[in-house]
Image (spheres, helix red, strand yellow):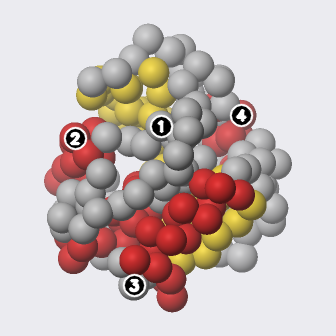
């Protein structure tokens, strides 16, 4: 597994051992970032990644958040319930020299701690079949993690059902291998 673009392109990342973590493939990450960077989703059609505060929820190896840092994000907050996963993400950030722009939180996705800073870009990669995508988005919105207009991406299994939560608008959904990645925009709690 490698960083696929930006300042750290080609640099290796490690994943936690075992079957509990399923890192987003290089191909799926490249496809997702191409859609984000060139899809006109940022203000005025620019990349929403550059200068963004990013939340990498269910971070696992941290590949998505580190890819964002490589492509110009200002800061990434890595969140996972697994200490092993967070330690792996921390080690990957250190190997890329990105610890100063990284924060690591041990927390459950459906009960996140209060944010110190709102995120403009959120990556959610829950275990396939867990059904945690919708409740995690709802919890992030309710606890104040999402800036108005924030983009969220949710990676789920290809055949998994996903219902867009209230306050979010689906912008795109595509299959990449065994995954389906949904891109949403946060509008407000009452939208």
Query: How far is mark 1 from mark 2, CA to CA?
Result: 14 Å
Q: Report whether residue 21 is seen.
A: yes
> What is the spatial separation of the Cα atoms under label 4 and label 2, in whole angstroms?
27 Å
Secondary structure under the numbered disc 4 in the rendered image = helix
Q: Nearer the viewer, residue 25 or 189?
A: 25
Residue 121 position within the rendered picture, expressed as x and y whole percent measured from the top left: 47, 59
Residue drawn at the location 19% of the way across and 67% of the way down:
9
Element type at marker 1? loop
Lateral position of residue 77 relative to residue 53, left or right: right
Q: Which mark is residue 135?
A: 4
Q: Earlier in the sequence, mark 4 or mark 1?
A: 1
Q: Label 1, on which residue?
A: 22
| Residue 173 in picture, x, y percent from top left | 35, 28
Q: Nearer the viewer, mark 4 or mark 2?
A: 2
Percent x, y of residue 75? 48, 77
- Give the residue at mark 3: 97
Q: Position of residue 42 (x, y in %)?
A: 32, 60
Q: Secondary structure at mark 2?
A: helix
Identify the residue under disc 2: 27
Within the image, what quadrant is residue 27 found in? top left
């Amino acid at each position: 597994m490698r960083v696929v673009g930006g300042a750290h392109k080609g640099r290796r990342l490690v994943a936690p051992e075992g079957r509990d973590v399923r890192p987003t493939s290089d191909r799926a990450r490249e496809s997702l970032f191409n859609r984000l960077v060139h899809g006109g989703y940022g203000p005025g059609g620019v990349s929403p990644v550059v200068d963004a505060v990013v939340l990498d929820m269910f971070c696992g190896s941290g590949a998505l958040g580190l890819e964002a840092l490589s492509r110009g994000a200002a800061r990434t907050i890595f969140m996972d319930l697994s200490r092993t996963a967070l330690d792996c993400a921390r080690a990957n950030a250190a190997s890329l020299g990105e610890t100063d722009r990284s924060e690591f939180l041990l927390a459950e996705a459906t009960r996140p701690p209060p944010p110190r800073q709102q995120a403009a870009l959120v990556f959610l990669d829950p275990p396939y079949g867990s059904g945690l995508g919708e409740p995690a988005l709802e919890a992030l919105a309710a606890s104040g993690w999402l800036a108005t207009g924030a983009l969220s991406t949710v990676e789920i299994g290809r055949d998994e059902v996903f219902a867009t939560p209230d306050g979010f608008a689906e912008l795109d959904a595509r299959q990449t291998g065994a995954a389906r990645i949904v891109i949403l925009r946060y509008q407000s709690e009452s939208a």
